[in-house]
Structures are given as structure tokens and as C-alpha cells.
Image: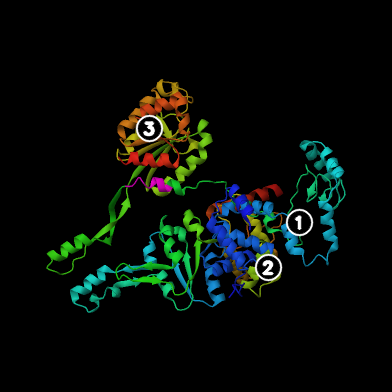
């Protein structure tokens, strides 16, 4: 049972080792990296590559660790007691299972994705330490202890908005998805658009990496933006020649809206184009 | 097994623990590295490094600790196929003493740079071996991999010890090494002491007590009472000393600023230089154009704000006690008067000082400010911050 590059995901060697190591040693894998380098997609790909069910838990700023375990719906029970429902006698009817419970009780070894853990409160990772370590937790209302039948493969992603506590980090495997080199990027594009013209890919990638090199960009375009852009270029049937940055004429690439997401960045490019023209004349 | 490597990592200030080391050993025992150096490198990295800022340091330590090892591991099977490479690297290792003395003889570092420039101009094509041209191998002071005690290393990212590219030599994570030792996390935790919870805003939570009470009064029919969520309503006004002697403490202050910005919803900040006078400003670049009257600030923010001064309190005594003592402009009233006005308005106030506490007694103005603050001066460390927040909570 090994994770490999799939038909629609290119995994580098270091990523493979990190994933397979985490799977073999049953440790959570913490994935960080620039936005748009495929952190969340990774979990989907691991699930489909290993043929396992994927349980996704998306974290928001209001998410509490308890919600991942279970929630006790006291208000429903109170209301039902008024109406004299039968279920009221069994408190278990009002315990709502969280994502972690789902993962622990799954009959098939699941992949659990905890997405963007840094969005939550600063104490959130600490509250999950024991649960992720021992893969069990206690339900106070019913007095039962939920234990994982099979230790799920846990993938955690973070965007670095908050620092994670050391105790939490120590229990994880860590992988930083660095920005792909041009060769890897060509493979990635080929995987997504198998019938694209070689020439277009080459020109698009050249101008893409040139844009990333421009100093002072607020938000550098990333893989997912490149893929969107190439899709646009293909559907608009842009001539690869038009992408060449010839003598400052074309310093702003066509359909730049897919790459530059910030009006300051667009201004920066316009300024550069202006300076370039000035130099020419 | 890799104990030395482990301690090398610790010496390089990478926070690795025994638990992580044991995990690595277990992974190696399971055969995850397949006994190949590249795979071992990736495995060690994923087990031991938990922060991308440390990746570059890790690469350096790895290169140092496993120098030469990868040759044996990767080439045992290939030695017979590529004798030339094998011979060359052996030649490199068994250099004679005379040769070593010879390379030592060539001038100092500056001379090397000069030579380098000269030779770069002379050189026409790629070169390997020999003792003059820039290239790989050989004893010229320039180039990669060669033996020369004072040689200059030029971008050694391919190595002829192994055919494959050594990944840790690429040092692709160099940009991420911020050199930040303590993060803002500890500060945030200390700032959390300063909390004052209150319920304001839209009611989103069930008020159980009130619901039970209302229901009982309602003759048993359910009457649900909602209430707003509990939030931190503390208000904080921070005044930062900036410029001059504070330049040494700029990193700590930035960390404090980003930590408090995250922690407090109602945070106001202004800058001053050395001591507070009649004007404060928000944008240090435009301070002469865009500053605020101190009186306006005192009137704008109510006395329920907690006031924090951040400064080294290191200045000339005149800046505190005499009119016109400011180093930058003419001030009609001495800094001390302004400081007292602040303290009169804001009952809860502290001064955080980035200067280590054992130097406080040697600087007269620190003693003076501390007296003016009624002793409420705390060092800008995690413990000091902790104590300071406790004081502000009184």
C-alpha cells in the first residue's frame, strides 16, 4: 500500500517519502506550503490512490476541538421532553458524531483531512493532542470511550497564519511543499491538460516564472493560478507567440487577471511596461 | 546510530527531541529509507524538522554530518563500472603535504578576490583539474570541490562524488530561514492574561440558566433564552518608543506588536521618540507631516484603556525633566509632565523595557522613569510580559 503519483497529481520524491513514512508509522502528516501548491488536493489524491474513504474536516475560526469529537444537543432534548417523545430517555439520541468519531468508527481505514488547522483558535491543536495520539476519546454524557478500530491516516494542512504548539508538532511528520521547479511544473501541466501544445506550455511557463521573479509582487501567482491561466489561454486560443515578452511590448501577459489577484500588482506591471516603453523610445 | 547527527542538529538550534529521533530510527528500521541516502535525507527531514524556517539549517547540518558517506552508499554497486570517477575522488583525498603547503602559500583573502576577477576575465571555457583555471577539482583557489584551504567556493551544487544531484546542497529553503528563534506564540499566550470577557453583540448562544428559569415560570412550556458570545473586550493603548537606541530592540518590538495586534480587538498604538511630549504619531515615515496632538489622544481614548509604554527609557536626563530637553524639537513642557498626564488619566498602565533587567540600575533615566511609573516597569521578556499583564489586570 504505497502512495504514488497519480493520473492527475504529480508527487515529488520527498513528498512520497513523507506520506509513506507517515502512513507506515501511523503519525499525522502536517503539510505546509504557499497557497495553491496543492495541500488540500494531496489528501484527495492519497485517498483515491490508496482507495480509501476520505473524511474532510474544514476548520474555521469558530471551530472548537470538541466539535470534531461530538456535540450534545441539549436544546433538542429539552424540546422533545416537552412533547413527550420516546427518544428522550436515551441521551445517546442527542449526541451528534463529529468528524473524528466518524473516522474512528469507520470499518475501512479512512483518510482524515484536517484542513487549515491554523484558522482555528490558538489552543485548538493542543486540545486534539491526546485524541490524535491515542486515537480515542471519552464521551462524558454516555460514559463510553470511543476507540479507533483502525488508526486513520491523518493529513493536516496549515497556511502559517498561526504558529502551532511544539507539543503538537513533535507528534507529526512535517512536509513543506516548496514551489515546483520548471521541470516538475511541466509535468503538472501535462497531467492536467494532456493535449496541450508543447509550444504554448513552454511560452506560458517562461512568462509565468518571469512574473514570479518580478520583485515587489504582493501575491506571487501559484500552481493553481497557472493552471487556470493555461486553461483560459487554451479556450481563448491564444497564439504562443503573443506570450513572448518581446522588448517590453508585451510585458503584461494576456488574460493577466487569472495570475495577478491584486490591483497593486497590476499597477506595478503597468508601471514596468511604461518604463520599458520609455526606454525604447 | 545517528547520535552525532542528532546532536549536530541540536547544536544548530533546530528543536529536535528524543521522541522525534526515535521516530526516525523506527522509520529507518522499517526500511522506509530503502538504504539510499537521498531517501534517508527526505525521511530525516520529514521526521525531524517541523518548521520550514529550519529547513535550510537542516540542509547545512546534514551536509556536514554525512559528508562522504553518500559516496559509499550510492556507489558500492557501480564502482566497477566507473573507475575513472572512483580514481579521481581517491586522488583528491590523498593529497601530499607539499601540495597542501603550496596552496597555503597564495596570499590572503583580498588577493584571492582580485585573482578571481582577473581569471574570470581570462577564462574562456569550462575547465576541470589543473591549478590555474576556475573549474571543478584541481588545486586552483577558485571553483568547487577542489582542495585548497583558502579556496573560494563557487556554487557547488553538483558534486562529482555522486552522479546524482545532492539535494541538500541545493539549499532551496534558504529564503525561509528567518532566523527567528522565539515566535510570537509565547507572547500571545502571555498577552492572554489580559482578558476581560463580556457578552456583547448578537445573541448566538443558549443561556441555560435563564432558559430553565423562564421555562419554569412559563408553567413548563419551553421558553428559550439566547445570549451573545463571551468576548474579550479589553482595550489597549500602546505607545512605542522608536528610533535611536531602540533600533537594537526592533525585532522584539515587532513581535510584540504583531502578537498584540492578533490578540486584542481594540488596540490603538502610537509612536514617540525617547519620551512622550505634545505630539505622537502613527506612521513613522510621515511623522513630521502626520502627527497627533497628545491632548487629543488622551481625550479620545477613555480611561478604561490599558496603557502600555514600550521603550528602553535610555536618554539624557534633560529629556525627562527640562523644557526644551527633547533631542528633536523645542518642547514647552518637560517629558515628565506629559508622562504624569498619561498616568493620571490611565489608572492601569505599565512600562515594558527591552533592556535586560540587570542594566536598569546603571542608567539614571531608567531609574527615573521607573520611579515615575510607581515601579510598574517590566522587562520585555515572556516572564516580564506575564507579570505586566497581571499588573494591568488589577
**Which numbered marker is on residue A200?**
2
- The image shows residue B337 at horizontal and vertical percentages of 36, 25
The residue lying toward the viewer, choosing from B185 and A202, is B185
Marks 3 and 1 sit apart, C-alpha to C-alpha, by 63 Å
Residue, disc 3? B294
- The image shows residue A204 at horizontal and vertical percentages of 66, 64
Counting residues from the start of the chain, the first of labels 3 and 1 encountered is: 1
Query: Quarter of the image containing the N terminus of chain B?
Result: bottom right
Residue visible at 58% across and 61% down in the picture: B24
Q: How is the image coloured?
A: rainbow
The residue lying toward the viewer, choosing from B91 and B306, is B91
Give the chain of mark 1. Answer: B
**Which numbered marker is on residue A14?**
none
- The image shows residue B87 at horizontal and vertical percentages of 85, 58
Marks 2 and 3 sit apart, C-alpha to C-alpha, by 61 Å
Against A96, residue B249 (above or below) is above
In the image, taking residue B102 as reference, residue B254 lies left or right, namely left
Look at the numbered disc 2 and give the secondary structure of its residue: helix
**Which numbered marker is on residue B159?**
1
Residue visible at 50% across and 57% down in the picture: A169
Question: Mark 3, mark 1: which one is toward the viewer?
Answer: 1
Against B195, residue B358 (above or below) is above
Q: Is residue B8 magenta?
A: no
Marks 2 and 1 sit apart, C-alpha to C-alpha, by 34 Å
Which residues, given as a range, are shown in magenta? B188-195
Q: Are marks 2 and 3 on the same chain?
A: no
Mark 1 residue crowding within 10 angstroms, few (<14) / some (14–19) / many (20+): some
Mark 2 residue crowding within 10 angstroms, few (<14) / some (14–19) / many (20+): many
Amino acid at each position: 500500500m504505497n502512495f504514488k503519483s497519480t493520473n492527475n497529481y504529480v508527487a515529488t520524491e520527498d513528498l512520497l517519502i513523507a506520506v509513506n513514512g507517515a502512513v507506515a508509522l501511523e503519525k499525522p502528516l502536517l503539510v505546509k506550503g504557499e497557497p495553491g501548491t496543492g495541500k488540500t488536493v494531496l489528501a484527495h489524491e492519497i485517498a483515491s490512490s490508496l482507495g480509501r474513504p476520505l473524511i474532510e474536516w474544514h476548520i474555521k475560526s469558530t471551530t472548537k476541538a470538541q466539535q470534531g469529537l461530538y456535540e450534545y444537543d441539549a436544546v433538542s432534548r429539552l424540546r422533545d421532553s416537552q412533547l413527550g417523545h420516546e427518544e428522550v430517555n436515551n441521551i445517546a439520541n442527542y449526541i451528534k458524531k463529529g468528524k473524528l468519531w466518524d473516522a474512528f468508527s469507520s470499518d475501512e481505514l479512512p483518510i482524515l483531512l484536517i484542513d487549515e488547522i491554523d484558522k482555528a483558535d490558538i489552543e485548538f491543536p493542543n486540545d486534539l493532542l491526546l485524541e490524535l495520539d491515542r486515537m480515542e476519546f471519552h464521551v462524558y454524557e454516555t460514559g463510553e470511550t470511543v476507540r479507533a478500530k483502525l488508526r486513520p491516516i491523518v493529513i493536516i494542512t496549515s497556511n502559517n497564519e498561526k504558529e502551532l504548539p511544539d507539543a503538537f508538532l513533535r507528534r507529526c511528520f512535517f512536509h513543506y511543499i516548496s514551489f515546483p521547479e520548471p521541470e516538475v511544473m511541466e509535468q503538472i501541466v501535462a497531467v492536467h491538460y494532456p493535449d496541450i501544445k508543447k509550444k504554448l506550455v513552454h511560452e506560458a511557463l517562461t512568462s509565468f516564472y518571469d512574473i514570479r521573479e518580478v520583485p515587489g509582487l504582493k501575491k506571487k501567482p501559484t500552481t493553481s493560478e497557472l493552471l487556470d491561466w493555461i486553461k483560459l489561454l487554451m479556450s481563448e486560443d491564444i497564439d504562443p507567440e503573443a506570450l513572448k515578452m518581446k522588448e517590453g511590448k508585451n510585458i503584461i501577459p494576456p488574460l493577466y487577471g487569472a495570475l495577478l489577484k491584486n490591483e497593486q500588482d497590476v499597477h506595478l506591471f503597468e508601471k514596468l511596461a511604461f518604463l520599458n516603453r520609455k526606454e525604447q523610445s | 546510530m545517528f547520535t552525532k547527527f542528532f546532536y549536530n542538529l541540536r547544536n544548530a538550534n533546530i528543536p529536535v527531541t528524543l521522541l522525534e529521533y526515535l521516530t526516525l530510527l523506527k522509520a529507518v528500521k522499517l526500511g522506509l529509507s530503502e538504504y539510499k541516502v537521498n531517501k534517508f535525507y527526505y525521511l530525516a527531514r520529514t521526521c525531524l524538522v517541523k518548521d520550514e524556517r529550519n529547513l535550510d539549517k537542516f540542509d547545512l547540518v546534514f551536509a556536514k554530518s554525512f559528508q562522504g558517506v553518500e559516496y559509499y552508499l550510492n556507489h558500492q554497486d557501480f564502482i566497477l563500472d566507473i573507475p575513472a570517477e572512483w580514481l579521481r575522488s581517491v586522488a583528491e583525498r590523498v593529497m601530499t603535504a607539499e601540495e597542501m603547503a603550496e596552496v597555503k602559500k597564495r596570499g590572503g583573502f583580498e588577493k584571492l578576490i582580485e585573482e578571481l576577477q582577473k581569471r574570470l576575465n581570462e577564462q574562456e571555457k569550462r575547465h576541470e583539474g589543473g591549478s590555474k583555471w576556475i573549474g571543478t577539482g584541481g588545486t586552483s583557489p577558485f571553483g568547487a570541490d577542489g582542495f585548497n584551504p583558502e579556496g573560494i567556493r563557487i556554487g557547488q551544487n553538483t558534486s562529482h562524488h555522486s552522479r546524482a544531484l545532492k539535494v541538500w546542497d541545493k539549499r532551496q529553503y534558504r529564503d525561509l530561514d528567518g532566523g527567528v528563534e522565539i515566535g510570537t506564540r509565547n507572547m500571545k499566550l502571555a498577552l492572554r492574561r489580559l482578558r476581560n470577557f463580556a457578552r456583547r453583540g448578537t445573541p448566538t448562544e443558549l443561556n441555560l440558566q435563564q432558559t430553565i428559569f423562564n421555562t419554569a415560570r412559563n408553567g413548563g412550556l419551553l421558553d428559550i433564552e439566547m445570549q451573545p458570545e463571551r468576548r474579550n473586550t479589553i482595550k489597549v493603548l500602546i505607545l512605542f518608543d522608536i528610533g535611536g537606541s531602540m533600533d537594537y530592540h526592533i525585532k522584539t518590538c515587532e513581535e510584540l506588536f504583531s502578537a498584540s495586534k492578533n490578540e486584542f480587538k481594540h488596540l490603538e498604538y502610537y509612536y514617540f521618540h525617547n519620551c512622550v511630549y505634545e505630539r505622537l504619531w502613527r506612521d513613522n515615515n510621515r511623522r513630521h507631516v502626520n502627527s497627533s496632538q497628545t491632548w487629543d489622544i488622551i481625550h479620545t481614548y477613555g480611561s478604561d484603556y490599558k496603557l502600555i509604554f514600550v521603550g528602553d527609557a535610555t536618554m539624557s536626563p534633560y529629556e525627562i525633566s527640562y523644557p526644551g530637553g527633547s533631542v528633536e524639537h523645542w518642547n514647552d513642557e518637560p517629558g515628565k509632565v506629559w508622562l504624569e498626564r498619561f498616568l493620571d488619566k490611565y489608572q492601569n498602565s505599565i512600562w515594558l523595557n527591552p533592556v535586560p533587567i540587570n542594566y536598569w540600575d546603571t542608567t539614571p533615566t531608567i531609574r527615573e522613569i521607573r520611579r515615575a511609573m510607581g515601579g510598574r516597569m517590566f522587562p520585555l521578556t515572556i516572564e516580564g510580559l506575564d507579570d505586566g499583564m497581571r499588573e494591568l489586570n488589577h
